[in-house]
Amino acid sequence: MCGLNGIFAFHSASCLPSNAELLATRDAMRTRGPDGAGLWRSHDQRCALGHRRLSIIDLSERASQPMVSEDDRLVIVFNGEIYNYPQLRAELQTEGARFRTTSDTEVLLHLYARDGAEMVHRLRGMFAFAIWDDRKRGVFLARDPYGIKPLYTASDGWTFRFASQVKALLAGAQVSRDPEPAGVVGFHLFGCVPEPFTLYREIRALPAGHTQWVDGAGPREPKSFANIAAILAEGARNAAPDADLNATVRSGALDSVRAHLIADVEVGVFLSAGVDSGALLGLMRNAGQRDIRAITLAFEEFRGSPEDEAPLAARVAELYGAQHIIRRVSEREFREDIPAIFEAMDQPSIDGVNTWFVSKAAREAGLKVAISGLGGDELLAGYPSFVDIPRWRGRFGPLAKMPGLGRVSRALIGAFLPGFARSRPKALGLLEYANTWPGAYLLRRALFLPHELGQIMDTGLLREGLRRLNPLRYLERLVEPDPGSNVGRVCAFESAHYMRNQLLRDADWAGMAHSLEIRLPLVDVSLLRSLASSLPKLSSGAGKAALADAPSPPLPGEIVNRRKTGFGVPTGAWMDAAGRAPSGGDRAGAHKGAVSRRWSHVVLEALTSPSQAVAL
Amino acid sequence: MTAKLQMLALVTDAFGGSGGIAQYNRDFLGALTESGAVSSLAILPRHAPDRSVVPPGIRQSPARPGWINYALAALLRRWDRVDVVFCGHLYMAPLAVLVARQARAKLIVQMHGIEAFECPTRLRRAAVEAADLILCVSRYTRARVLSWATIAPERIVVLPNTVGECFTPGDGSRLRTEWGLDGKRVLLSVGRMDSRERYKGHDLVIKAIPELVANGHDVSYVILGGGDDQPRLEALASQAGVAGRVRFMGSAGQDTLVDAYRTADLFVMPSTGEGFGIVYLEAMASGSPALGLAVAGALDALADGELGMAVPEVEFAAALTHALDRPKPDPRALANAVRARFGRDSFTKGALAALDRVLEAA
């Protein structure tokens, strides 16, 4: 887990990379890698790589980066973990590869030397890396299929730059800050910036599951090598209605947890009172981990109330023999941390605060690595969206197919029932969006609907942003090829939009701000493949029940039947309070959607004019 | 590289034309044919004042000045098999899309400068977005295109102008004597004085002259190029009390231009609207140091300050004084540095790489 960056002056007219820029970008990512830092330059000085290291596998100096292959041909900077590296290493050794370290980084070097760009198909894990190929005079970049690890690129036509964070690229002071209207509109629509866009036109995410090649002829368009929808579609073609769901989930999840435990440092776990993290803790025990520290976030406001997760989490910790650490957070600490949160937040996000605190707690406990249950709701149909979206499509889709009906009804309700229009803005969109899958999903996940944005954004920026983002087309691409079932479609949307752009990004910046690697056994392509054929027929609640049943002993019934709260219920109220102007304002009607909307303004303002954040 | 590649070029002008765009087209198309990458090239120009200069192996059709006439010629003529259509100007991009689709050919659209700085009509924007590859002369032009076109940034490639072989360091004393500039510190600008544009920055130089003189620099400011803004600039020089030091020498032929560059102590053009600024390169290739603003395409020609000086406008007057205080750099070293980045070899390499890129595009 680390921070990486690079500058490649690929054009014959460009200036050589400066050390000042390379260092400024690298060291803006100090918290991603506090254990070491390195630099490397090609012989002709045209390519320079930087790296900050958080040592987790092979803690020795030999494994530091940038790492150069024995023959000097290849140089790598890598952020992430390759969980199947022991198997790959053994395979490569059999073929004669000689290893100088026990790191997964060196495995990547040898694998590239053998397979070239095709290497990515062999990797299980979370990764973003860049390999300089001296023979071909170019850089090969890759990012994992789910997009757990970030990688941002910027090309001005002469020089190609990349880094693990948007803010790190900006810190180098050579990348344009011209705004990207699609990124701004995307944030208002979703509460996170949909990739590949960022808030800046020149900076783009290398899309999840893509590779990119850059040589003297410039950067090529990123190429897809893995696609969530395609894996789901493949599963639907081989649907296994009679398979034992519980057994499939058990073996798949245990296999994933086992793979995710590989490390030369202690691996802890985030533990809530929910199914996902509890099951993972049990599976960690089943996988053979003896000493486990489990971190639970709790809130002063809830102490002693049914909403307090700590007592139930303590029962789960006890069940699986984990050392339980309960970390209580108060509104005061939240307010004190806001400036640091905004500073760490790489791109605007309306979430991530809970991950910030649980990561902080893990780091306080001395952990470098923690397992998280993130991804369980996307994979096993745990969100209400798995029910809502198909239902909306069924009920309102036929009506919404009538041309113009949606807009007309919205205009009429806005004119005659303005109160309803204000309090239920999304209900107004049902007749406009429910006729397509992307439309129904937009309705489910939108912070603001497109027709509302005119009230909060400059019209020109909005028009251009909508044109460039094309939200419905953007969402449509996430379900291409068609995953073949309702569960599959929603799973693809939630995994490739919400989880990728919101949850995974939040886990990255909030974890990295505390130099903590968050590992996600439920966000694993091997696990997805093993479950894909079972998903089309998954009934409501069955997936989570199967996961609860996966560890031995299984999770107690009170966990399974508990109303879902997730981590951190009071943060919504805190955000609501912090998101209000100092003059106060109407506190009535502060439901979750309204809170998120207000909070989004605070976040965007803080991230686009940093001086504002401190004054909050 | 694909063998026997056939290309059709739709251009405003190329061989027999004048000006920067025609030069670029000649350089680009010449590089592709001379290297053998393109085996057959047909050019359809809108203007071609002098047809006698078309090199052997290139077919250039008679010029078609009118738009309708031109479009009909492009669409109705039965071209040989065409693999790649090169469109030399944004204004022709919609037509080029039709021709390329008809021929099932790849499409390259060339962007120069000011025409691409603001969002064009919807039709032209759609045409640009439909191209397989966009070539821009500078990073700035590329950034402007990306600001209005929804297109993968990887499909927009910078291929800078190249500097002509005739621009080399040498003795400029003959012209200096002829123009009565012996003993003077000579500042030189080359560019049109267009009253509708006024971005070349002549005003800034004229206004800076009194302070240069006060600091002991006996300067003359030579302006090459014509244009309807000259009377206003003459009046400005008079108002500033430097009319005798500002010399409007009109448009110059190539020989005079080379000598003018060679004789200049400093090429100075604080322009704010260059697509690229080929004149900075010509000056430096001829051995004259160059000063411009760190604005738009000039930054490319000045290589971010590594070849010439590129300063913010507020620092321009101070930078001008500073430049004259320093000794003139070694002309040969400067010329070599310019050729290393913007010489013919680099240009040919870039042109071939661009062709490869368009052919590898799915």
Image (cartoon, coloured by chain):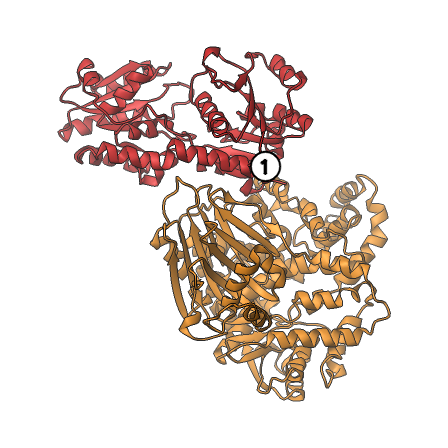
Chain colours: A orange, B red
Q: Is residue B245 rendered to the left or right of residue A337?
A: left
Chain letter of the residue beneath label 1 in the structure image: B
Give whichever of A550, A439 is nearer the camera.
A550
**Above or below, comparing residue A271 to residue B290 in the picture:** below
The percent position of residue A448, horizontal first and vertical second, equals 66, 51
Residue A39 visible to the viewer: yes
Q: Secondary structure at mark 1?
A: helix
Q: Which residue is mark 1?
A: B359
Q: Is residue A303 rendered to the left or right of residue B277?
A: right
Q: Residue at x 37, y 32 (%)?
A: B343
- Disc 1 marks a residue whose amino acid type is Leu
Residue A274 visible to the viewer: no
Q: How many marks?
A: 1
The percent position of residue A98, horizontal first and vertical second, equals 49, 69
**Above or below, comparing residue A206 to residue B87 in the picture:** below
Q: Is residue B189 rendered to the left or right of residue A484?
A: left
Q: Is residue A43 rendered to the left or right of residue A298?
A: left
Q: Residue at x 41, y 35 (%)?
A: B346
Report which quarter residue A423 is drawn in: bottom right
Give whichever of A14, A183 is nearer the camera.
A14
Q: Residues within 10 Å of mark 1 (few under 14, many from 20)?
A: some
Q: Residue at x 82, y 57 (%)?
A: A391
**Above or below, comparing residue B222 to residue B37 in the picture:** above
The percent position of residue A326, horizontal first and vertical second, equals 57, 82
The percent position of residue A265, horizontal first and vertical second, equals 51, 79
Give whichever of A372, A139 is nearer the camera.
A139
Give whichever of B285, A421 is nearer the camera.
B285
